[in-house]
Amino acid sequence: MDAIAAAQVLSEIGYLLRQDPKEVFRAKAFSAASWSLAQQRPDLEALAKANRLTEIEGVGAGIAKVLAGLVETGTSTYLDRLREEYKQPARDDESTIDLARYRGDLHSHSNWSDGRATMLEMARGAKALGYKFLGVTDHSPRIKVVNGLDAERLLAQSQEMAEVQAQVTGIELLQGIEVDILEDGALDLPDPVLELLDVVIASPHVKLRQEPAAMTARMMRAVSHPHVDVIGHPTGRRPGSREGASYDFEAVFKEASRNGVALEIDCDPARMDLSPEMARLALDCGCDFAMDADAHAPAELAYVPMGAWLARRAGIPMDRILNFRTDPLTKTPD
Ligand SMILES: [Zn+2]
Ligand SMILES: [Zn+2]
């Protein structure tokens, strides 16, 4: 078993353990070990043979045992047990997600808002992973704590982006925004600004506990907006610590599908939003997906291989995921 496949197993274990408040510490340990496998991609067979799995960063004796089992048998009895415990038994219609064909991430942040790296560092990180494109989608003005971008700063950012693009070849930088979905479903930037951007991710960040009827109206308006490409982390949940928004998911997902608006699987282990169950519902409603890291630093781009299990478990075929397409934003598959 290769490191990326193993990272997905550890990530799913971390996700399942997060459902139990008593297991938060262990959950985070599994997610951290998964992240280090996803970044460093060590040769697990060789390390297992030499009894050196604990030399991997974040891998203690317990996780090493799970990894050793994986290398030996290709499956994890611990994961099987957790799936049963959390009522997520093995399914027979999982899809195959070939991460070698993942072409680029549509949702990332730079130090123009709350990211911890420059656009140049993010671009180089994405290029090192072989990506063909990277969406730089910093926050919109309403999110003041993170220095969200208004029209003027977006213009300044586009100038820096052109300079970065000239320095980093072989990868296309897409200027975007993660625009806040306001309480009434309007977006936090005017249409003429959104129209100029390459990618618009509309996300709910505040007032997630609105009444379901109001929340449904809010999300319906967001998925009907002509400039929106993707709904970012569609429920805003944080497994184990914050319940997400509740709305008429079927109605909103169907409307998104009708309008060619993709739903995001945000692979940040603290989010994993959509959940596998919700992603399955969205698939059945005809939606397309974006599978993004929502990275705030280059190392976090590795969240995508960590979250890929979620698309696989939801049975989402690769051709329904924008990130695998040559031209991810044309709203029609290759
Ligand atoms: Zn967000
Ligand atoms: Zn984000």
Image (tube, rainbow, N blue to C red):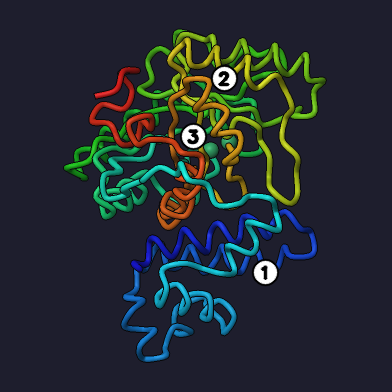
Looking at the image, tell me whether mark 1 or mark 2 is earlier in sequence order: 1
Residue located farthest toward the right when viewing the structure as drawn = 211
Q: What is the secondary structure assignment of the residue under circle 2?
A: helix
Percent coordinates x, y for residue 239 in the rendering: 69, 48
| Marks 3 and 1 close (CB-CB < 8 Å) | no
Question: Measured along the vertical axis of the image, is residue 66 above or below residue 275?
Answer: below
Q: Mark 2 = which residue?
A: 253
Residue type at mark 3? Asp
Residue at the spot 51% in from the left edge and 38% down from the top edge = 265
Left or right, 95 with respect to 115, comes to left
Q: Mark 3 = which residue?
A: 138
| Marks 2 and 3 close (CB-CB < 8 Å) | no
Q: Say which of marks 3 and 1 sits in front.
A: 1
Residue at the spot 46% in from the left edge and 8% down from the top edge = 226
Q: What is the secondary structure assignment of the residue under circle 1?
A: helix
Q: What is the secondary structure assignment of the residue under circle 3?
A: strand
Q: Mark 1 = which residue?
A: 26
Residue located farthest toward the bottom when viewing the structure as drawn = 50
Residue type at mark 1? Arg
Percent coordinates x, y for residue 204 in the rendering: 64, 27
Queried on whether the Cβ of the residue with tag 1 lies below 8 angstroms from ligand 1, the answer reads no
Q: Is residue 201 visible?
A: no
Left or right, 222 with respect to 23, comes to left
Q: CA distance from mark 3 to mark 1?
A: 31 Å
Percent coordinates x, y for residue 30 in the rendering: 58, 67
| Marks 1 and 2 close (CB-CB < 8 Å) | no
Looking at the image, tell me whether mark 2 or mark 3 is earlier in sequence order: 3
